[in-house]
Amino acid sequence: MHAAGLLLAWALLRPAGTQQCHNAGPGGVLRFTDTHAEIRVPALHRVPSSLDPLYGLVRRCLDLIQQNPLPTELLRAALNDPSSVQTSQVVQYELGYVVCAAVALLFTVAVPMAGMCFCYCRSRRRCGGRLRAHRRSLGCRRHCLLSCLSLTSLIILASVICAFVTSQRVKVQMEPGLGAVPSTLRTLRQHIANVPQGVQMVVDQFEVPRQQITSDLGGLSRSVGLSIHAQLKAMTYAALAELQDRAGDLQTSLHHLQILEQTARALAAARDELDPVLRERRRRVVALLDDPRCTSCASVLGRAQSLELGADYGKVPSVEKVLKALAGLPRSDFAEMIRQGNGTFNSIPELAVERMAQVIQDLRDEMARTTEKVQSIADSFPLHDYTRPVSEALMKAEDRSQPYLREVQRFEHYRWIAGTVLCSIILLILACNVAGMALGAYGLSKREDPSDYECRGEAGAKFLLVGVGLAFLFSWLLVLLVFATFLVGGNIQTLVCRNWVNQEIYKFIDTPGNLPPSMNLTRQLNLRRDSNLSTTYRECKSGAGLWEVLHLDRAYDLDEHLKTPKVRAGSRQSLWGCHGDGTSFTGDTGGRSGSPMPGSITSMPPPQYTADFQKRLADFTARLGDVRLLRSEGRQDLETFARSGVDEVDYGRFQEEMRKPVVQTSIPGLARSLEGLQKMQRNSTVAGRLAAEAQALWQMQNSTVQSQEALVEKLGESVQFLSHLAPHLQERVRTTLATIASVEARLPVQAQQILRQEIGCFTRRELRYFTQYLNWVGQTLREDVASCQPLATALDNGRVILCDRIADPWNAFWFSLGCCTFFLIPNIIFAIRLTKHFRPIRNRLISTGSEETCPFHIPRVTALKL
């Protein structure tokens, strides 16, 4: 009872509506699908290669050949007035390439002429013939020439391998690189064209918060009912427990009062019956003990004389009046009453589901209408007027690029064929060198006499001469191919790629007057007047959207559609409860309270999307059935119990009489004393009489006195209960009745406050879903759907394809082929000089000794001729 009272006091004194809204956990964060990832332009990057050192060497060589910066004035004149461009200006800027062209022209003329001279001399047997005399230094010279020709051949072989590899790499990269141009333009155009579709897909993502809100609506009614039940159950259960205690007090008090009345009467009647029997027994015992024949009986005589009745229960107050006042109680079934109160209170969650079914359905229908309102974002989004110029420019660039790309592809096909043929010829020259050196060296090793004819050495010399002839014959074609590819690739690297990397091209385009009006990108792409290509490129690369680049905010205020304005606190909310008398009611305190209600919304999405949703929640009312804890007949029973006079009975008189024994002298003690005297007697008659009297006393004790003592003990229990209950009876009954009345009065009030809190929490949570969605819409429309990052990525991809994947191997090809061509000159010289060493010597010395040992010798004349 004490614990229940403390619990009830805490429940009554605790402020209502103090439970806060649950914080949104991981489930409170919406996850939206990235619906626009498929229109991204994949970024390309330079792939590290084993040829990177060769590429770097070629770029450094080109930087030495062309040291001039971007020709701004020359390009401006060429774009705006081509007729004003002077050849001297072009030659001055391309001076490095002009020098290289002069060298190539000189090589093209000189090497064939040298070949013709060699052929003439060879026909006159004045070049490439035989040695005229044997010298001891010929072996050293021969080995030196072999080494030089071998080294030159190795260098040419390495260069031609690099030429083959780079030529094939150009061919491999050229086709996808050229195909990437129209595909990238189409992807960009698709990106621009898909922006409206992307906006619609973003708007369609409203299905995510709609499904979440619909799911929350499905559990709202039960959640509200459970919350009301959970927050009010302590107070209600404590009041019902106290009511059950008072009902128990009534039942128990009535029981003990009946016991009190019946026991007191039984004890009075038993006293009247015991009194004559006890007097007779006292007389006989006294007479026996006073007999002179009784030995040592004087010590017990005093106790026998005091053998008389003690307590007189005829003097205690009667409780008959109280029993008459309580007659017929309890007239109500408190157990059934408490069970019904518990059942009604515990049925609140199910009742809430039933009462809120219609409003939940209305809110779901309202969410369907909200979907149509959100569609206005896509319908009013201005795109066509801004994306059309960009799409047209991309389409025009795609159409105009097709013929040029086909010509480039055709030229590349011819270049690859020519390069492959010429590289094969170089390999053939190397093969002649290898075969000539191998056969010649083998023939020398088998020749015993230097003047003897040896076919293997002669064949080696002829192989070398064939290689020399091929070198003279095709060197001018090699030079022409090298210069043609060098002129194209070198200018692409120095004029385009180098200035593309340092963004000098962007600065040139941004400078007013450099481009003709027909190429004004700012006007054609409908960019801001204060923007330029460099700024736009940087903005797009950093993730800016077409929103900023095309300046869409001037035509469509997205923030106005997505902003979250402030609203007044204390918005009108629904109430739900019942009056203290049990009559159902509906109410509204939104206009009566000046303070913000619990869970009031301080910010929300734009009202055009959620106004009707909020209004339906604000106008929501419901009716809760009766929650009566104590009916009127039960209240009357408790009031009758309090007025019955239970607390007016003098329970002290009962306790005073109960403190007295039934008999003043202890009958068992007297009987034991008589039994002890019996053993001391010499007279058998007296001893027999003592034994009989002791037996009679024991019989009286066991039959009469003990039953009265049991009644006294039973009476004591009832007196103890009633004496403890009586002083606090009226206060407890009054407290219980007041508590029940207070709980019945507070239930509707606190139910109203809990409902206000739960509706406020629900509204705030659901509007937070709206806010998340609208924030995501704003971010996505600005940065993802309408992103111009693909434009910057396309420009970077173009630089990677043109410069890193095509220009680098292209330039490495002509550089490698140029090395082959350059080293053909020493190859020709070394091959011609080595040819004489593989043929028999024209004159042979007499002695093989040194000139020092045979200073005077006559050479032998031979008539051996080749």
Image: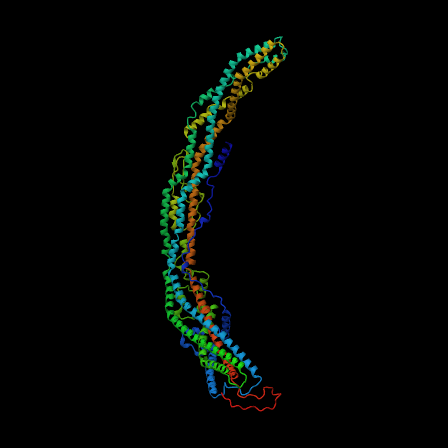
Describe the colour scheme in one phrase.
rainbow
390 relative to 702, above or below: below
What is the x, y in percent for residue 299? 63, 13
Q: Nearer the viewer, residue 107 or 865?
A: 865
Which of the 4 image quadrants contains residue 571? top left
Q: Is residue 361 above or below residue 103?
A: above
Is 849 positioned to the left or the right of 540 in the image?
Answer: right
**What percent of the width, then of the height, locates residue 151?**
53, 77
In the image, residue 737 above or below residue 462: above
Q: Can residue 573 be seen?
A: no
State which quadrant residue 384 falls in.
bottom left
Which residue extends farthest top?
Answer: 292
* Residue 591 at x, y percent in the picture: 41, 42
**Front-lying residue, 661 or 437:** 437
**Relative height, residue 577 to residue 302 (above, below):** below
Spot occupied by residue 247 in the image (x, y as percentages of width and height): 46, 28
* 798 vs 586, nearest the viewer: 798
Q: Nearer the viewer, residue 382 or 629?
A: 629
Q: How many marks?
A: 0
Q: Determine whether, in the image, residue 12 is placed left or right of residue 140.
A: left
Tell me if I can see residue 349 in this picture: yes
Farthest residue, direction right: 296
Q: Quadrant of residue 663?
A: top right
Residue at 56% from the left image edge and 18% from the top image edge? 661
